Image (cartoon, rainbow, N blue to C red):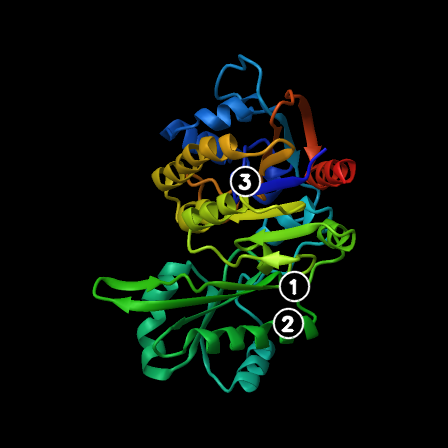
């Protein structure tokens, strides 16, 4: 029984052992093991039960965890942010979103250029930081939009903010989203990637904005229709195209900003779900294959966690999970197909091992807990 559920997604904190990892080219990937071997503070995650989860063999399984815990395996085809989050809310994606290893088809690019009145450059799979290094000067000279993709199903547009203001960039992204929705191409996200030039080089700003494919009906819709509060923190509104939310606190500047917003919600008397995405482990460290940065990122979360748990009220639930892996020691810069952790803690309740479940087990737990507590 719960009045308030705080669901925190540690974006890309996989735990390895996905049965189908080989078919994705990710055999042996294990995000948690990589950062654990490097070393990070983990006291609170440990006492909740992270290292008791089936398949996690990094510490002896001694003591009784505070939380209920499980390994989650993904049914959906894919290993991207949208697919993972949607399945956590009960939507299984049988067909993977389209990807473009050779860039987007020329007919689509021509349509986009015609609609926006802007030329494009690049149109290749690229590292988000390297593409700026390689194309920023050409953009400054021509005023064109830097369009690129990755191994994910994304149409990304990078632009220098003093050349193309942020709101104008968002407008171009909305045009791309509309054109993709009208096309035969099923693309998960259009992403705005504004950047600036500093004395030390080009730097991406906090103006990133995702424009997602509209999801099918999911748990968020159900909760909203039943009168529950559904509050998104971080990328949640972007990932679900605003669907099913009663309130969004907006995209986080960084994890610290998201954690501060989440802690402030402890003071508010809402009834329902607070759904939080913390993206730094993925976007800042995982894709850039920065092991030490990733380890420090999760260590900072663990340190924050103790104070948050202390301030939770009776009947509050803390749930922690992830949406896919992004092993910072693995080859390439792509996400990795891994199982993810699930921890479910309510003050005064004893922990339990739920073994291995599907991602949608999260939706089942939320639904049951809120319905019982209504």
* Direction left: furthest residue: 199
* 226 w.r.t. 109: above or below: above
Image side of residue 224 versus residue 278, left or right? right
Regarding mark 1 in the picture, which secondary structure is present there?
Answer: loop
> Where does the image place residue 122, in percent across and percent down from the top left?
44, 71
The residue carrying mark 3 is 26
Within-10-Å neighbours for mark 3: few <14, some 14–19, many 20+? many
Image side of residue 222 versus residue 185, left or right? right
> Where does the image place residue 348, in percent across and percent down from the top left?
62, 23
Regarding mark 2 in the picture, which secondary structure is present there?
Answer: helix
Q: Is residue 282 visible?
A: no
Could you tell which of marks 1 and 3 lies nearer the N-terminus? Answer: 3
102 vs 66, nearest the viewer: 66
* 95 w.r.t. 203: above or below: above
Q: Is residue 229 visible?
A: yes
Regarding mark 3 in the picture, which secondary structure is present there?
Answer: loop
The residue carrying mark 1 is 213
What's the distance in space between the residues labelled 3 and 2, CA to CA?
29 Å
Image side of residue 36 versus residue 351, left or right? left
- Callout 1 touching callout 3 (CB < 8 Å): no
60 vs 27, nearest the viewer: 60
Which quarter of the image is occupied by the C terminus? top right
Would you identify the image quadrant in which residue 272 lies?
top right
The residue carrying mark 2 is 180
Could you tell which of marks 3 and 2 lies nearer the N-terminus? Answer: 3
> Where does the image place residue 161, in percent across and percent down from the top left?
37, 73
> Where does the image place residue 212, in percent across and percent down from the top left?
61, 63
- Callout 3 touching callout 2 (CB < 8 Å): no
What's the distance in space between the residues labelled 1 and 2, CA to CA?
9 Å
- Callout 1 touching callout 2 (CB < 8 Å): yes
Within-10-Å neighbours for mark 1: few <14, some 14–19, many 20+? many
Residue ID at (60%, 26%): 347
């Amino acid at each position: 029984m719960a009045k308030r559920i705080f669901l925190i997604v540690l974006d890309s904190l996989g735990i390895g052992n996905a049965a189908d990892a080989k078919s994705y080219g990710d055999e042996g990937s294990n995000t948690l093991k990589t950062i654990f071997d490097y070393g990070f503070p983990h006291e609170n995650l440990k006492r909740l039960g992270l290292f008791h989860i089936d398949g996690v063999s990094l510490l002896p399984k001694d003591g009784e965890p505070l939380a209920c815990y499980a390994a989650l395996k993904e049914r959906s085809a894919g290993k991207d942010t949208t697919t993972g989050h949607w399945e956590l809310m009960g939507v299984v994606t049988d067909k993977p979103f389209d990807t473009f290893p050779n860039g987007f088809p020329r007919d689509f690019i021509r349509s986009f250029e015609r609609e926006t009145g802007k030329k494009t450059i690049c149109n290749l799979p690229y590292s988000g930081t390297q593409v700026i290094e390689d194309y920023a000067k050409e953009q400054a000279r021509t005023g064109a939009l830097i369009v690129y993709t990755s191994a994910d199903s994304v149409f990304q547009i990078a632009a220098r903010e003093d050349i193309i203001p942020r709101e104008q960039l968002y407008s171009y992204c909305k045009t791309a989203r509309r054109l993709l929705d009208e096309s035969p191409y099923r693309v998960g996200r259009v992403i705005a990637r504004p950047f600036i030039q500093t004395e030390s080089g080009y730097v991406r700003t906090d103006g990133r904005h995702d424009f997602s494919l509209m999801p099918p009906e999911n748990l968020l819709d159900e909760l909203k229709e039943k009168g529950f509060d559904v509050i998104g923190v971080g990328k949640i509104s972007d990932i679900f195209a605003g669907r099913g939310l009663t309130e969004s606190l907006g995209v986080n500047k960084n994890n610290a900003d998201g954690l501060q917003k989440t802690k402030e919600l402890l003071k508010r008397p809402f009834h329902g779900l607070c759904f939080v995405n913390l993206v730094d482990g993925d976007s800042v460290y995982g894709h850039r294959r920065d092991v030490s940065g990733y380890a420090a990122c999760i260590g900072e979360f663990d340190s924050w966690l103790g104070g948050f748990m202390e301030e939770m009220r009776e009947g509050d639930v803390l749930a922690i999970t992830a949406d896919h892996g992004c092993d910072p020691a693995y080859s390439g810069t792509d996400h990795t197909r891994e199982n993810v952790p699930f921890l479910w803690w309510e003050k005064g309740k004893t922990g339990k091992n739920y073994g291995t479940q599907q991602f949608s087990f999260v939706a089942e737990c939320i639904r049951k807990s809120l319905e019982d507590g209504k």
